[in-house]
Image (cartoon, rainbow, N blue to C red):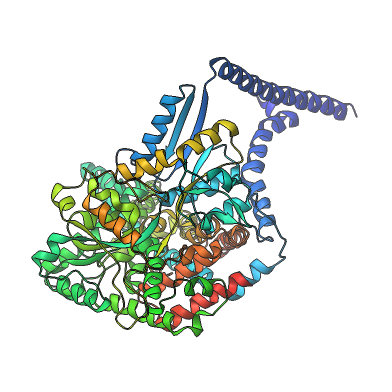
Amino acid sequence: MHMTSRYHKNTLVAISTLMVAMLAACSSGGSTKAGSESSDKDAKMVTLRLFTNQPDRKTGQGLAEQMVVDNYMKENPNIKIEVEAIGDEPFRNKQKAYMASNEPIDITMVHSGADLNTLVQAKYVRELDPKEYEGDNYKFFSGAFKSYTFDNKIYGLPRNSDYEVIYYNKKLFTDNHVKVPTTFNELIEAAKTFRANNIVPMSTNGKELWTFGLMYQDFAQRVSGDPNAILDAVDHKKPFTQDPSFMKTAELMKQLMDVKMFQDSYMTADYGTSQNLFTQGKAAMWYMGSWEAGMASNEKLSAEFRSNLGVMSVPRVEDGKGKATDLLAWNGGGYALTTSSNHPEEAKKFFDYMMRADQWAKAAWDTGAAVPAQKYQLTGKESEVQKQLTDILMNGTSMPGASFIDFGTPGFKDEAQNALGKFFAGSSTPEQLINEFQAAADKQKH
Amino acid sequence: MRKVLSNKVAIFLFVFPGIVLFALTFLAPIVLSFYYSFTDTLGPGTQLTMVGFENYKELLLHDSRFWRSLLNAVLLGLGYIILQHPVCILFAILLDRLGGKAEKIFRTIFFIPCVISVVVISRMWLNLLDPSFGIVNKLLDIVGLSSWKHAWLGDTSTALISLLFILIWSGFGWGLLFYYSGIKGIPEDLYEAAHLDGASGIRLHWKITIPLLAPVIAVQVTLAMITALKQMETVFLTTNGGPGDATQFLGVYLYNKAFSASQYGYANAISILFIIVCLLATYLSNRFIPSENA
């Protein structure tokens, strides 16, 4: 009895000591925070956090972004903008982790479509009023908000007009007497010639799989002549299996593999690796988006490469219903405000400033980083690549406005990309690819 | 001191922080994971609908990618046990017999892969095995075996075996270290006695070294199975599970389902099955591998 009461007493003392220690720890943490807040107030300094997928702050879109950030900090000395910039693949994953932990980022880069949809459902991004972004300050192209709209509400603004083109090395084409292809068969012939001369015809980032999705959609559009057919199939309006143009496109893709269009290591190549192969003059073509316009003015790349850089439209398919001017265009990357921001008002002021036509759009165009989603003024100093990209956009005859792998749920994207991975690795047939697309669409409907 | 350690309150005070830490960092996530595995949530904070055993049914009955991942992990585990560990034991014995400076030098050389970052190892092997610029294909060219040239990690027929080779190679140093220290713990007089009895060569090691290494082998086999099941970093950095699903492993598959496909509930169901499989593997290896000296 005596022993028991002594234990009770000791236990009580122990628990009380522990609780006091824990409370002390809590209170000291609280007082530190209060202290820092009050000192913040005194100095009237506000620090905003910008999370972005542009780690290179000296060239391309990273430079354009940094220019806007610097402009804003110069005009608003009480605002400090901390930039957290990491490469795109880790960015996408870290953004999900930030979403899960409600990290107080103020402004974040977002990928429209499936990725943004997840952020919207988690209530991590703020709803925006589209009326605020009409008019001369912003000058967005019509339809630019399509992939940012969910239930008739918009949750972000696009930074670019994204569309797929083929960048090519003029010198390699001239030296090997290859005609710049305007049709699919010419593309196949070009590949054969380059292969015969030990040159990689086209570089691609197969490890990341999304480029295959865009390439498939690009040619499907040229086969069917209907940019919305593939989006309707994802949307379960018309099955993949009932439209012969999808099978025909898969067969064309098979032909690309059969002539060894891509580098031998294409299934393990990431974005940077595939780009290096092209910029080092070891691959004749690179299938990529308009956001790579900055290559022409990137001084890290050799002058020889830059002077030989050309842009072509994706070739038309000989017996297809589409035209060479059909453009796989959409608004992919953009920016959004988060709901977890510690400084929502200041964050919105910076966001509104950044998205103005005379800020991001101007900086992106003037630096040659990308083709904006807003009307931009030609400066007369544009690189040849920029002029060609402008021509391709202005002459675009039909545009789907969305990438099909991003048009469904993130689950659909995963399944569709996995099907493309198997197909491009040579372990499934065109029939299996179409059936797997259909199964992925069925699954998301279910 | 003895008095303090026999006091139950003192024991409680010493153990309590550890238990709290364990509960918060191990048990709580597993309990949460278990809960999420019965939902179809896209991620924490998103809408959450209870779906019962749907995720588990889908996984076990319809998800060939899950079974592929598990099969690859088992193959890697077998690779560790059948290929890597016997070679580790052989090299540990040779190293022990070598003695002197050479022993120290080779011990260091064999351990080098273990101190190199996984990122560097992955990048290095990607470059070595690159079909166009990699040294492996170039060497094949030089020795006249051009027909053997391959996109080692990019071809479905060779990707898995190439990846298993990288993993077995990079883990070799650890296995060697464990067996080597085990051998160093065997008293020299046992060998001397065996010599006097006329034992030598392979027979000596078969009868003395291997039986006395049994406890180390038992632990190593268990660790090998768990390491194989948990494999993630090298796969993620080299093939990301591709091409297709040729090199899909549980860790990468669950990571991609949670963070790329936003199928967070489903990914949690994978993680719960993952835990069960790991526990089962540990139990089986403990149950069937004798760890005591015969």
Residue that extends furthest to the front in the rendered view of this protein: A136
Q: Position of residue A307 (x, y in %)?
A: 15, 52
Residue drawn at the location 63% of the way across and 23% of the way down = A29
- Res A343 seen here: no
User: As displayed, is residue A21 above or below residue B214?
Assistant: above
- Res B102 seen here: yes
Who is closer to the viewer here, B288 or A149?
A149
Q: Position of residue A342 (x, y in %)?
A: 59, 32
Who is closer to the viewer here, B135 or A182?
A182
Residue drawn at the location 46% of the way across and 60% of the way down = B228
Who is closer to the viewer here, B86 or A169?
A169
Q: Position of residue B160 (x, y in %)?
A: 37, 68
The answer to whether residue B135 is left or right of residue A166 is left
Residue drawn at the location 68% of the way across and 51% of the way down = B31
Residue that extends furthest to the right in the rendered view of this protein: A1
The answer to whether residue A270 is left or right of residue B228 is left
User: As displayed, is residue B246 above or below residue A133?
Assistant: below
Q: How many marks?
A: 0
Q: Quarter of the image holding residue A426?
A: bottom left
Q: Position of residue A238 (x, y in %)?
A: 55, 79
